[in-house]
Image (cartoon, grey):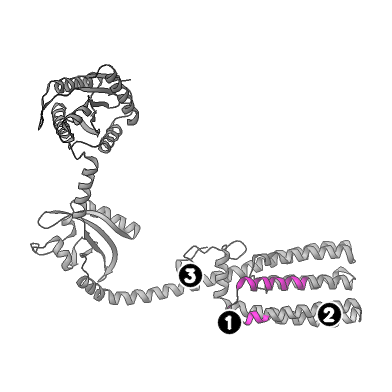
Amino acid sequence: MSVAPNAAAQSGLPETSWRIGRNGLFIDREQDEAFIRAEWGVFGPRVRQIGLYGSVAFLSATFTDLSVLGATAVYWSLLAARFMILGWGLWLARMGSARPAPPIRRVGAALLGFELSIMVLFLLVVLAYGGGADYHSITALALIFAGYAYVPVLRREAMWIGGIFTALFAVVVWSSLRFDTKYVNIALVLFGFANVAGWQIAVSLSRGLRTAWLDRRRLEFEAQAAQDARQQAEQSEENLARLFDATPMPLVLVRVADAKVLRFNAAAKNLIDPQGRKQGEVFSTDFYEDPTLRARLLARLRTEGAVRQEEVRLKTVSGQVIDVLFSMRLLRFAGEDCIVSGMVEISAQKRLEHQLRVLAFTDPLTGLQSRRGFFAMSEQAMRAAPPGAPGPCVVLIDLDHFKLINDRYGHPVGDEVLVEFAQVVLSLLREGDVMARMGGEEFCLLLAHARAAQALEVAERIREFVAAHPFQTSAGVVRLSLSLGLAGCDGPARNIDEVLSMADQAMYRAKLGGRNRTEMHCA
């Protein structure tokens, strides 16, 4: 069985599911203790009565001890034990009278110990009296039924006392009392019935108390919630008007049924319609850049209960697109289902993010893709390729002896050469090809739609054109040659790091072969 979160809130425990086990107690021990504390007005008097009346009744049996045993050492020992139980019972009665409830585990342990001590002392009395088993069985059955039917279950272990006591009593009967076969058969039936029926009674009582408590808490919560809802409904329109007028955040109130805007504050007007062009009825669907977005947000709102900090693109009345953080929540207004939406414009932030992304993926000197940008575009190309398709061609380019240019003319001239080199190569590439600066004087081409023969043709065209091209710089004309390594192409799509490694090996062979040449490593 479970209960709504209100019971958890009223009990002081975290919001959770309240389930009752087969023994009639809450499965969670902390929940069960919370229930006993909440219902201490029921459990406390029971504990007090058990401690007080049980111990007094057990002490009064000392007169029977005297008549049976006489003033013997055994009698005085039993009398001392009965007074100990009286003291224990009075202590238990004091705990039952305490307000508020004392620690429940402590009370449960004391009550369990009180039951056990009475049953143990009863067994000692049986051993001291001796005689026939049938005489003592009546009292034993009474104790079992009393334990199950009247003693409240404050600890799970208490449910087993009846069975344990029955087993110990059987040992005492077997070892010390007189009995016959007829007694054994009757005892098995009676004691079995007492434990089975007693267990069911205890479970039923425990379950009934806990179920009734949960139901009361649920009803109390629902009544309080209904009262709160009425009060909130009475104040909602006034509070909403104040909220709309006072808050600097753009707020819009929209009717769910037809998307009609019922109310918006000055901040929302300045954001969506600063010139006041919109006249007559206004509908929220007019302001979404994507017309289908409202339906998707509404579905999320109904499923999740709220939409928080969602990035949305809206259109102003003048048609300008703006980026906002959009938050939505359902409410009742004037008896209708409505949505209140809050907006925070983030257009400047989005532009800055775009600029930062461009900077992160762009080489600041040449304007080409950076190493990071090259890897991003390579992975995108490999994901877009159909399964089993050949991988994209990669051409690594190294400017031969570029260090000599820097050493002879200086780094500013070297930068001029790199910039002009990038523009020259870009003019020789096909649409869809990507060029990136990997670092220093090393560049890379991504030829996503080329096979080996085509890639080799592109590489050679670049190499020959650059070798013949006079690079104009502030220090005069500079000549260049290139070493190129080609990889990927006609083999199956591979990890881009593996393709680059093969291209690097091919470029290294081009350098070893005398530079100003192209080498291939295509599987």
How many tags in the picture? 3
- For label 1, the residue is 99
What amino acid does circle 3 point to? Ala
Horizontal placement of 67 versus 290: left or right? right
Q: Where is residue 231 in the image (x, y as percent from the top left)?
A: 33, 77
Residue with the mark numbered 2 = 79
Mainly helix, strand or loop, the magenta region? Answer: helix
Q: Quote the CA–CA distance across marks 2 and 3.
A: 48 Å
Q: Along the line of sight, which residue is nearer the eye, 498 or 155?
A: 498
Name the residue tied to disc 3.
7
- Precedes in sequence: disc 2 or disc 3: 3
Q: Which of 396 and 300 lies nearest the eye of the viewer?
A: 396
Q: Which residue is drawn at 22% across and 47% down?
A: 356
Q: Do the residues labelled 1 and 2 touch (CB within 8 Å)?
A: no
Label 2: how many residues lie within 10 Å, few (<14), some (14-19) or many (20+)?
some
Q: Which of marks 2 and 3 is in front?
A: 2
Disc 1, SS: loop
For the point 59% across and 66% down, the residue is 25
Determine contact: label 1, label 3, CB under 8 Å: no
Q: In which quarter of the image is the C terminus?
A: top left
Camera-side mark, 1 or 3: 1
Q: Which of 514 and 438 is in front in this view?
A: 514
**Circle 1: residue type:** Arg
Q: Which amino acid does label 2 sit on?
A: Leu
**What is the spatial separation of the Cα atoms under label 1 and label 3, in whole angstroms?**
22 Å
Q: Is there any visible trace of residue 173 in the rendered image?
A: yes
The span picked out in magenta is: 93-119
